Amino acid sequence: MGAPPVAHESNDQIRSVAEVLSATLSTSAVRHILAEHSPDATGHCRGCRFPTTAAPVWPCRLWEIGKEMERLREPRTRR
């Protein structure tokens, strides 16, 4: 496998949702979201599959929110 995926540029909506959820979800819950919303062999999200709709192209919004929650929890380094 190649390098780990990186979330797209964080936008205000994703960051706002991640900030709210980060206060309530555990680290293991965030890891679970990221694991569930991984790409399949066709490049679509495994976690967003529903019988009546096509899965979005990965990375989906939930994965991006999960990655933003991880980023928000990273310790800040001093410059």
Image (tube, grey):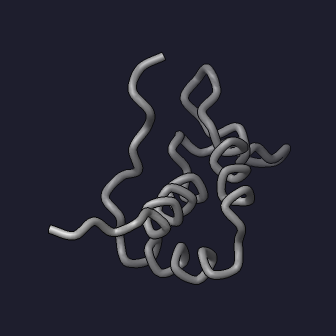
Percent across and percent down for residue 55 are 66, 42
Give the residue furthest to the left. 79
In the displayed structure, 64 sits above or below 50; it is: below
Percent across and percent down for residue 60 are 55, 50
Query: What number of labels is visible?
Result: 0
Q: Which of 76/4 is in front? A: 76
Q: Quadrant of residue 76?
A: bottom left
Percent across and percent down for residue 42 are 58, 23
Give the residue furthest to the front. 78
2 left or right of 70?
left
Taking the spot 68% from the left edge, 42% from the top edge, the residue there is: 35
77 left or right of 34?
left
Give the residue furthest to the right. 51
Taking the spot 74% from the left edge, 47% from the top edge, the residue there is: 53
Taking the spot 57% from the left edge, 59% from the top edge, the residue there is: 66
Q: Which of 57/21 is in front? A: 21
- Image quadrant where one finds the C terminus: bottom left
Taking the spot 51% from the left edge, 60% from the top edge, the residue there is: 70
Q: Which of 73/54 is in front? A: 73
Q: Which of 74/44 is in front? A: 74
In the displayed structure, 50 sits above or below 28; it is: above
Percent across and percent down for residue 67 are 50, 56
